[in-house]
Image (cartoon, rainbow, N blue to C red):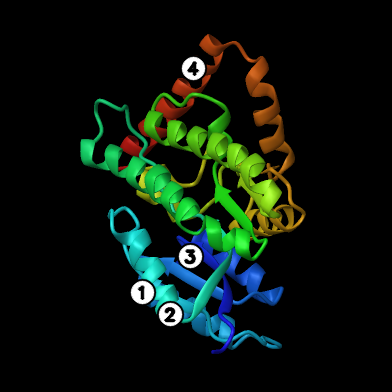
Amino acid sequence: MSAPRKVMLITGASGGIGADFARVAAAKGHDLALVARNRAALDALADEIAAAPGQKAPRPLVFDCDLSRANAPAAIEAFLEQSGADVEILVNNAAYGVLDAALDGDMAEQLGMIDLNVRALTELSLRFGKSLARNRGRLLNVASVAAFMPGPGMAVYYASKAYVLSFSEALSAELAPFGVSVTALCPGPVPTGFQARAGFPRPMSPMRHIVLSPFDVARAGYDGMMAGKRVVLPGIATRAMAWSAPFTPKGLSLKLISSLQMRRKWKEGAGK
């Protein structure tokens, strides 16, 4: 029996940070398994990676599914087993947010954020935990600088990312004895399809001066993960926001973030 194909599994890989994380990892020689809903985008990315000069790893495995569905993690596991693949590195990137007051937003969308951002990420981390331990591998969960503060106007999204950060840091302690590093990547604003899905205005004003590219965030996340860092905060402005959050009075933080989200929502409405 041949040895299993050791792969880096990346969710939400059809665009944005996930796609650029795949490009960065492929350039470093990793064998990849890519997951997202958009099969055409996944195939295009897999073809791009396979055709890259000097690429030695086989064409990435591709599996299209909706991770918000309860059976998705089990389906991914079954696909990898059938493909003879063993997860050495797991990158939980898939997530979405919605810009709206919690009571005004669509309830299915609000609960869908929990299904994807929290439940799917948790199940994948647990489902592949033994594989990671067997391979003394790595786990990276994409959180957000939003994890460090409350988020009126995006209450469920901010809370979901606080969960991801807390969960990741706890797992880093639990999995360390097995040789597994766990990293929470906490970017600030990044221009991806996330903004359109969330209902953000374009451009990302008034925060465009602190925005990093998806590639820069992916590269920072990859480097931090490979270095075994517990938390990665890409960019000086992102680090400043995270570090200052514990020292900012909660009432002031709530007012500032609420004001920011209201301006975003107003600009979005004014542009329609």
Residue contact between numbered discs 4 and 1, judged by CB atoms under 8 Å: no
- Badge 3 crowding class, 10 Å Cα cut-off, few under 14, some 14 to 19, many 20 or more, is many
Q: What residue would you read off at disc 1?
A: 39
Which mark, residue 7?
none
Q: Mark 4 and mark 2: span between their CA atoms? A: 42 Å
- Mark 3 vs mark 4: give the one in front: 3
Q: Residue at x 77, y 54 (%)?
A: 227
- Mark 4 vs mark 1: give the one in front: 1
Sequence-first tag of 3 and 2: 3
Residue contact between numbered discs 4 and 2, judged by CB atoms under 8 Å: no
Q: What residue would you read off at disc 3?
A: 13
Amino acid type at image mark 3: Ala
**In terms of secondary structure, where does tag 4 sit?**
helix
Q: Nearer the viewer, residue 80 or 36?
A: 80
Q: Residue at x 63, y 15 (%)?
A: 248
Q: Position of residue 96 (x, y in %)?
A: 40, 47
Q: Residue at x 43, y 75 (%)?
A: 81
Amino acid type at image mark 4: Leu
Sequence-first tag of 3 and 4: 3
Q: Quadrant of the N terminus?
A: bottom right
* The quarter of the displayed image where residue 262 is located: top left
Residue contact between numbered discs 2 and 1, judged by CB atoms under 8 Å: yes
Sequence-first tag of 4 and 2: 2
Sequence-first tag of 1 and 3: 3
Q: What residue would you read off at disc 4?
A: 254
Q: What residue would you read off at disc 2?
A: 43
Q: Quadrant of the C terminus?
A: top left
Amino acid type at image mark 1: Arg
Q: Mark 4 and mark 1: span between their CA atoms? A: 40 Å
Is residue 175 placed above or below 59 in the rendered structure? above
Q: Nearer the viewer, residue 95 or 201?
A: 95
Residue contact between numbered discs 3 and 2, judged by CB atoms under 8 Å: no
